[in-house]
Image: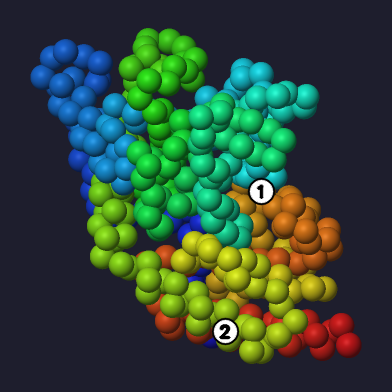
Amino acid sequence: MDVTKRVYLDWNATAPLREEAREAVVAALDTVGNPSSVHAEGRAAKAIVERAREDVAGLVGCRAKEVVFTSGATEAAGVLAGRRDVLVAPTAHDCLTVHRRSEGADRVMLAMGLANSETGVITQPPAKGEDGYALDTWRADGLLLDVVQAVGRIPFAFSWSGADFAIVSAHKIGGPKGVGALIVRDGQEITTLRPGGGQEMGRRSGTENVAGIAGFGAAARAALADQEAGVWTGVAELRDRLEARIAAAAPETVLVGRDRARLPNTSCILTPGWKGETQVMQMDLAGFAISSGSACSSGKVKSSRVLMAMGFGETEAASAIRVSLGPTTTMDEVDRFAEAWIAARARQRARAA
Protein backbone atom coordinates (compact mmCIF):
# COMPACT_ATOMS: atom_id res chain seq x y z
CA MET A 1 0.00 0.00 0.00
CA ASP A 2 1.14 3.53 -0.78
CA VAL A 3 0.92 5.03 2.72
CA THR A 4 1.70 8.48 1.35
CA LYS A 5 -1.86 8.53 -0.03
CA ARG A 6 -3.68 8.83 3.25
CA VAL A 7 -7.37 8.07 3.70
CA TYR A 8 -9.45 10.19 6.05
CA LEU A 9 -12.15 8.19 7.86
CA ASP A 10 -12.75 10.39 10.92
CA TRP A 11 -15.58 12.65 9.76
CA ASN A 12 -17.30 12.59 13.16
CA ALA A 13 -14.23 14.28 14.66
CA THR A 14 -14.25 16.96 11.99
CA ALA A 15 -15.32 17.08 8.37
CA PRO A 16 -12.90 18.32 5.72
CA LEU A 17 -13.41 22.01 4.96
CA ARG A 18 -15.83 22.48 2.08
CA GLU A 19 -14.64 24.61 -0.80
CA GLU A 20 -17.77 26.77 -0.47
CA ALA A 21 -16.86 27.46 3.15
CA ARG A 22 -13.24 28.24 2.30
CA GLU A 23 -14.31 30.78 -0.32
CA ALA A 24 -16.80 32.40 2.06
CA VAL A 25 -14.15 32.71 4.78
CA VAL A 26 -11.65 34.33 2.44
CA ALA A 27 -14.24 36.76 1.10
CA ALA A 28 -15.31 37.72 4.63
CA LEU A 29 -11.71 38.32 5.68
CA ASP A 30 -11.59 41.05 3.03
CA THR A 31 -14.61 42.78 4.59
CA VAL A 32 -13.15 45.37 6.92
CA GLY A 33 -16.16 46.50 8.97
CA ASN A 34 -17.30 45.58 12.46
CA PRO A 35 -20.86 44.20 12.37
CA SER A 36 -21.84 46.56 15.20
CA SER A 37 -20.76 49.67 13.28
CA VAL A 38 -23.45 51.70 11.52
CA HIS A 39 -21.37 52.87 8.55
CA ALA A 40 -21.35 51.12 5.17
CA GLU A 41 -18.41 48.89 6.03
CA GLY A 42 -20.09 47.79 9.25
CA ARG A 43 -23.37 47.15 7.46
CA ALA A 44 -21.55 44.97 4.93
CA ALA A 45 -20.09 42.83 7.73
CA LYS A 46 -23.49 42.70 9.44
CA ALA A 47 -25.06 41.49 6.19
CA ILE A 48 -22.61 38.59 6.05
CA VAL A 49 -23.53 37.55 9.58
CA GLU A 50 -27.25 37.80 8.94
CA ARG A 51 -27.06 35.86 5.67
CA ALA A 52 -25.23 33.09 7.51
CA ARG A 53 -27.86 33.17 10.26
CA GLU A 54 -30.53 32.52 7.65
CA ASP A 55 -28.50 29.68 6.15
CA VAL A 56 -27.88 27.97 9.50
CA ALA A 57 -31.57 28.35 10.34
CA GLY A 58 -32.41 26.69 7.03
CA LEU A 59 -30.26 23.68 7.86
CA VAL A 60 -31.43 23.34 11.46
CA GLY A 61 -35.08 24.03 10.69
CA CYS A 62 -35.64 27.03 12.93
CA ARG A 63 -36.22 30.76 12.67
CA ALA A 64 -33.23 32.96 11.96
CA LYS A 65 -33.83 34.96 15.14
CA GLU A 66 -33.47 31.73 17.14
CA VAL A 67 -29.82 31.29 16.04
CA VAL A 68 -27.15 32.62 18.42
CA PHE A 69 -23.60 32.34 17.08
CA THR A 70 -20.95 31.03 19.49
CA SER A 71 -17.39 29.73 19.38
CA GLY A 72 -18.72 26.18 19.09
CA ALA A 73 -21.15 23.67 20.56
CA THR A 74 -19.28 23.48 23.87
CA GLU A 75 -19.81 27.18 24.51
CA ALA A 76 -23.42 26.84 23.37
CA ALA A 77 -23.93 24.11 25.98
CA GLY A 78 -23.07 26.75 28.56
CA VAL A 79 -26.75 27.70 28.47
CA LEU A 80 -27.05 24.91 31.06
CA ALA A 81 -24.55 26.55 33.42
CA GLY A 82 -26.08 27.89 36.59
CA ARG A 83 -29.28 25.89 36.23
CA ARG A 84 -29.97 24.14 39.49
CA ASP A 85 -31.12 20.80 38.10
CA VAL A 86 -29.88 19.30 34.84
CA LEU A 87 -30.44 15.65 33.93
CA VAL A 88 -27.98 14.49 31.27
CA ALA A 89 -28.32 11.26 29.29
CA PRO A 90 -25.48 8.83 30.17
CA THR A 91 -24.35 8.59 26.55
CA ALA A 92 -24.27 12.37 26.02
CA HIS A 93 -21.18 14.25 24.90
CA ASP A 94 -18.81 15.55 27.57
CA CYS A 95 -19.83 19.16 26.88
CA LEU A 96 -23.24 18.28 28.35
CA THR A 97 -22.20 15.95 31.16
CA VAL A 98 -20.11 18.65 32.86
CA HIS A 99 -23.38 20.44 33.62
CA ARG A 100 -25.08 17.45 35.27
CA ARG A 101 -26.87 18.51 38.47
CA SER A 102 -29.82 16.25 39.11
CA GLU A 103 -29.51 14.70 42.54
CA GLY A 104 -32.74 14.87 44.49
CA ALA A 105 -34.65 17.12 42.09
CA ASP A 106 -38.26 16.59 41.20
CA ARG A 107 -38.19 18.57 37.98
CA VAL A 108 -35.18 19.07 35.75
CA MET A 109 -33.85 20.30 32.44
CA LEU A 110 -33.07 17.32 30.21
CA ALA A 111 -29.94 17.46 28.02
CA MET A 112 -29.26 14.72 25.48
CA GLY A 113 -27.70 13.98 22.12
CA LEU A 114 -29.86 13.16 19.13
CA ALA A 115 -27.10 11.06 17.52
CA ASN A 116 -24.14 9.66 19.42
CA SER A 117 -20.73 10.64 18.08
CA GLU A 118 -19.08 7.31 18.95
CA THR A 119 -21.71 4.81 17.84
CA GLY A 120 -23.96 6.83 15.55
CA VAL A 121 -26.99 5.51 17.44
CA ILE A 122 -29.99 7.84 17.19
CA THR A 123 -32.09 8.46 20.30
CA GLN A 124 -35.55 9.94 19.89
CA PRO A 125 -36.27 12.61 22.47
CA PRO A 126 -39.30 12.07 24.70
CA ALA A 127 -42.55 13.68 23.69
CA LYS A 128 -43.62 16.73 25.65
CA GLY A 129 -46.96 16.48 27.38
CA GLU A 130 -48.99 18.91 29.43
CA ASP A 131 -46.83 18.06 32.44
CA GLY A 132 -43.48 18.31 30.65
CA TYR A 133 -41.28 15.47 29.46
CA ALA A 134 -41.92 12.13 31.20
CA LEU A 135 -38.69 10.30 32.09
CA ASP A 136 -39.44 7.27 34.28
CA THR A 137 -39.70 8.88 37.73
CA TRP A 138 -38.48 12.25 36.48
CA ARG A 139 -40.33 15.17 35.00
CA ALA A 140 -38.39 17.56 32.81
CA ASP A 141 -39.56 21.10 32.22
CA GLY A 142 -37.17 21.73 29.34
CA LEU A 143 -35.09 19.96 26.72
CA LEU A 144 -31.70 20.72 25.17
CA LEU A 145 -30.71 18.64 22.14
CA ASP A 146 -27.14 18.16 20.95
CA VAL A 147 -27.64 17.84 17.18
CA VAL A 148 -23.98 18.34 16.26
CA GLN A 149 -23.66 14.94 14.54
CA ALA A 150 -27.21 14.84 13.21
CA VAL A 151 -27.83 18.02 11.22
CA GLY A 152 -27.14 17.63 7.54
CA ARG A 153 -27.04 13.83 7.80
CA ILE A 154 -30.52 12.82 8.94
CA PRO A 155 -33.86 14.64 8.75
CA PHE A 156 -34.20 17.12 11.58
CA ALA A 157 -36.02 20.36 12.21
CA PHE A 158 -35.82 22.24 15.46
CA SER A 159 -39.32 23.55 14.80
CA TRP A 160 -40.88 20.09 15.18
CA SER A 161 -38.37 18.58 17.61
CA GLY A 162 -40.08 19.90 20.72
CA ALA A 163 -36.73 21.03 22.11
CA ASP A 164 -36.25 24.33 23.86
CA PHE A 165 -32.58 24.57 22.92
CA ALA A 166 -30.18 22.90 20.49
CA ILE A 167 -26.42 23.11 19.96
CA VAL A 168 -24.66 22.95 16.58
CA SER A 169 -21.04 23.03 15.36
CA ALA A 170 -19.76 24.27 12.00
CA HIS A 171 -16.79 21.97 11.55
CA LYS A 172 -18.92 18.81 11.66
CA ILE A 173 -20.60 19.86 8.39
CA GLY A 174 -17.51 21.09 6.56
CA GLY A 175 -17.34 24.59 7.99
CA PRO A 176 -14.41 26.15 9.82
CA LYS A 177 -13.44 25.13 13.34
CA GLY A 178 -14.16 27.44 16.24
CA VAL A 179 -17.71 28.52 15.38
CA GLY A 180 -21.09 27.07 16.29
CA ALA A 181 -24.53 28.08 17.42
CA LEU A 182 -27.03 27.84 20.22
CA ILE A 183 -30.61 27.57 19.00
CA VAL A 184 -33.03 29.19 21.43
CA ARG A 185 -36.73 28.62 20.90
CA ASP A 186 -38.57 31.90 20.48
CA GLY A 187 -39.93 32.96 23.85
CA GLN A 188 -37.23 31.26 25.93
CA GLU A 189 -35.19 33.53 28.16
CA ILE A 190 -31.54 32.74 28.93
CA THR A 191 -28.74 34.20 30.96
CA THR A 192 -26.19 35.70 28.58
CA LEU A 193 -23.51 33.21 27.59
CA ARG A 194 -20.87 35.93 27.72
CA PRO A 195 -21.48 39.38 29.22
CA GLY A 196 -20.12 42.46 27.53
CA GLY A 197 -21.22 44.60 24.62
CA GLY A 198 -24.53 42.88 24.00
CA GLN A 199 -23.92 41.34 20.59
CA GLU A 200 -26.07 38.44 19.33
CA MET A 201 -29.28 39.99 20.64
CA GLY A 202 -27.69 40.37 24.06
CA ARG A 203 -27.22 36.64 24.42
CA ARG A 204 -23.50 36.32 23.61
CA SER A 205 -21.28 39.38 23.74
CA GLY A 206 -18.06 39.91 21.82
CA THR A 207 -17.37 41.00 18.26
CA GLU A 208 -18.69 38.32 15.96
CA ASN A 209 -16.27 35.99 14.18
CA VAL A 210 -17.43 37.24 10.80
CA ALA A 211 -15.16 35.00 8.71
CA GLY A 212 -15.99 31.89 10.72
CA ILE A 213 -19.70 32.66 10.65
CA ALA A 214 -19.57 33.20 6.89
CA GLY A 215 -17.94 29.80 6.47
CA PHE A 216 -20.55 28.25 8.75
CA GLY A 217 -23.36 29.67 6.65
CA ALA A 218 -21.82 28.47 3.38
CA ALA A 219 -21.27 25.00 4.83
CA ALA A 220 -24.86 24.92 6.07
CA ARG A 221 -26.17 25.72 2.57
CA ALA A 222 -24.01 23.02 1.02
CA ALA A 223 -24.86 20.45 3.71
CA LEU A 224 -28.58 21.02 3.20
CA ALA A 225 -28.17 20.62 -0.56
CA ASP A 226 -26.27 17.35 -0.04
CA GLN A 227 -28.94 16.00 2.27
CA GLU A 228 -31.75 16.91 -0.10
CA ALA A 229 -29.84 15.27 -2.97
CA GLY A 230 -29.65 12.00 -1.03
CA VAL A 231 -25.86 11.78 -0.86
CA TRP A 232 -25.94 10.15 2.57
CA THR A 233 -27.75 7.13 1.15
CA GLY A 234 -24.61 6.35 -0.79
CA VAL A 235 -22.51 6.88 2.34
CA ALA A 236 -24.68 4.36 4.21
CA GLU A 237 -24.09 1.82 1.44
CA LEU A 238 -20.32 2.23 1.85
CA ARG A 239 -20.63 1.85 5.62
CA ASP A 240 -22.60 -1.36 5.16
CA ARG A 241 -20.02 -2.64 2.68
CA LEU A 242 -17.22 -2.01 5.17
CA GLU A 243 -19.07 -3.72 8.00
CA ALA A 244 -19.95 -6.74 5.87
CA ARG A 245 -16.30 -7.26 4.95
CA ILE A 246 -15.12 -6.97 8.53
CA ALA A 247 -17.87 -9.22 9.90
CA ALA A 248 -17.05 -11.90 7.31
CA ALA A 249 -13.33 -11.85 8.08
CA ALA A 250 -13.65 -11.42 11.86
CA PRO A 251 -17.04 -12.69 13.06
CA GLU A 252 -16.01 -12.17 16.67
CA THR A 253 -16.29 -8.42 16.24
CA VAL A 254 -19.31 -6.53 17.53
CA LEU A 255 -20.75 -3.85 15.26
CA VAL A 256 -22.22 -1.62 17.92
CA GLY A 257 -25.67 -0.28 17.09
CA ARG A 258 -25.99 -2.25 13.86
CA ASP A 259 -29.49 -3.34 14.87
CA ARG A 260 -30.63 0.17 15.79
CA ALA A 261 -31.37 3.40 13.98
CA ARG A 262 -28.09 5.25 13.52
CA LEU A 263 -26.23 7.76 11.43
CA PRO A 264 -25.53 6.67 7.85
CA ASN A 265 -21.78 7.15 8.13
CA THR A 266 -20.71 5.69 11.48
CA SER A 267 -19.29 2.26 12.33
CA CYS A 268 -18.31 1.43 15.90
CA ILE A 269 -16.31 -1.80 15.67
CA LEU A 270 -15.55 -3.61 18.92
CA THR A 271 -12.96 -6.40 18.77
CA PRO A 272 -12.50 -8.21 22.10
CA GLY A 273 -8.86 -8.51 23.15
CA TRP A 274 -7.55 -5.83 20.78
CA LYS A 275 -7.28 -2.37 22.28
CA GLY A 276 -8.85 0.39 20.28
CA GLU A 277 -5.89 2.72 20.81
CA THR A 278 -3.59 0.06 19.37
CA GLN A 279 -5.81 -0.30 16.33
CA VAL A 280 -5.86 3.46 15.80
CA MET A 281 -2.05 3.62 15.85
CA GLN A 282 -1.65 0.64 13.53
CA MET A 283 -4.14 2.06 11.04
CA ASP A 284 -2.48 5.46 11.24
CA LEU A 285 0.85 3.89 10.28
CA ALA A 286 -0.95 2.16 7.41
CA GLY A 287 -2.25 5.50 6.15
CA PHE A 288 -5.77 5.66 7.61
CA ALA A 289 -7.20 8.24 10.01
CA ILE A 290 -9.77 6.72 12.37
CA SER A 291 -10.44 7.11 16.10
CA SER A 292 -11.22 5.11 19.20
CA GLY A 293 -14.06 7.37 20.31
CA SER A 294 -15.01 11.01 20.59
CA ALA A 295 -12.27 13.36 19.38
CA CYS A 296 -12.58 15.22 22.69
CA SER A 297 -11.35 12.06 24.43
CA SER A 298 -8.54 11.20 22.02
CA GLY A 299 -5.16 10.66 23.63
CA LYS A 300 -6.82 9.64 26.89
CA VAL A 301 -6.22 5.93 27.38
CA LYS A 302 -9.47 4.86 29.00
CA SER A 303 -12.55 2.82 28.27
CA SER A 304 -15.41 4.46 26.45
CA ARG A 305 -17.92 5.89 28.90
CA VAL A 306 -20.57 5.69 26.19
CA LEU A 307 -20.04 1.99 25.54
CA MET A 308 -20.04 1.17 29.25
CA ALA A 309 -23.33 3.06 29.57
CA MET A 310 -24.65 0.78 26.82
CA GLY A 311 -23.80 -2.28 28.91
CA PHE A 312 -20.33 -3.27 27.70
CA GLY A 313 -17.63 -4.15 30.23
CA GLU A 314 -14.62 -1.93 30.78
CA THR A 315 -12.26 -4.19 28.82
CA GLU A 316 -14.74 -4.53 25.95
CA ALA A 317 -15.32 -0.79 25.88
CA ALA A 318 -11.58 -0.22 25.48
CA SER A 319 -11.51 -2.47 22.40
CA ALA A 320 -13.56 -0.34 20.03
CA ILE A 321 -12.73 1.90 17.11
CA ARG A 322 -14.87 4.39 15.26
CA VAL A 323 -14.78 4.66 11.49
CA SER A 324 -16.80 7.58 10.16
CA LEU A 325 -17.28 8.28 6.46
CA GLY A 326 -18.40 11.27 4.45
CA PRO A 327 -19.78 12.24 1.03
CA THR A 328 -16.32 12.27 -0.57
CA THR A 329 -15.34 8.82 0.76
CA THR A 330 -14.90 6.35 -2.09
CA MET A 331 -15.48 2.62 -2.43
CA ASP A 332 -11.78 2.14 -3.09
CA GLU A 333 -10.91 3.86 0.19
CA VAL A 334 -13.37 1.70 2.11
CA ASP A 335 -12.00 -1.46 0.52
CA ARG A 336 -8.40 -0.45 1.18
CA PHE A 337 -9.19 0.18 4.82
CA ALA A 338 -11.00 -3.14 5.17
CA GLU A 339 -8.01 -4.98 3.69
CA ALA A 340 -5.56 -3.17 5.97
CA TRP A 341 -7.67 -3.79 9.06
CA ILE A 342 -8.21 -7.47 8.26
CA ALA A 343 -4.47 -7.96 7.72
CA ALA A 344 -3.69 -6.21 11.02
CA ARG A 345 -6.26 -8.37 12.80
CA ALA A 346 -4.63 -11.52 11.40
CA ARG A 347 -1.24 -10.37 12.70
CA GLN A 348 -2.72 -9.59 16.10
CA ARG A 349 -4.30 -13.06 16.28
CA ALA A 350 -0.97 -14.67 15.39
CA ARG A 351 0.83 -12.78 18.13
CA ALA A 352 -1.80 -13.75 20.68
CA ALA A 353 -1.69 -17.44 19.74
Q: Report the residue marked by disc 2.
A: 244
How packed mark 1 is, by other alpha carbons closer than 10 Å (few <14, some 14-19, many 20 or more), is: many
Q: Which secondary structure, mark 1? A: loop
- Mark 2 burial class by Cα count in 10 Å: few <14, some 14-19, many 20+: some
Q: Is residue 94 left or right of residue 16?
A: right
Q: Position of residue 268 (x, y in %)?
A: 62, 66
Distance of label 1 from label 2 (alpha carbons):
26 Å
Q: Residue at x 60, y 30 (%)?
A: 140
For disc 1, the marked residue is 91
Task: Label 2, secondary structure: give it.
Answer: helix
Q: Which residue, as the protein is rendered here, is positioned at the far left?
A: 40
Examine the rendering and report whether any part of residue 283 can be seen: yes
Quadrant housing the C terminus: bottom right
Instruction: Identify the residue at horizontal 78%, vertical 61% (top origin).
Output: 312
Question: In the rendering, at what x and y percent does residue 6 appear?
Answer: 49, 72
Residue 45 x, y percent position in the rendering: 20, 27
> Which amino acid is tagged 1?
Thr
Q: Earlier in the sequence, mark 1 or mark 2?
A: 1
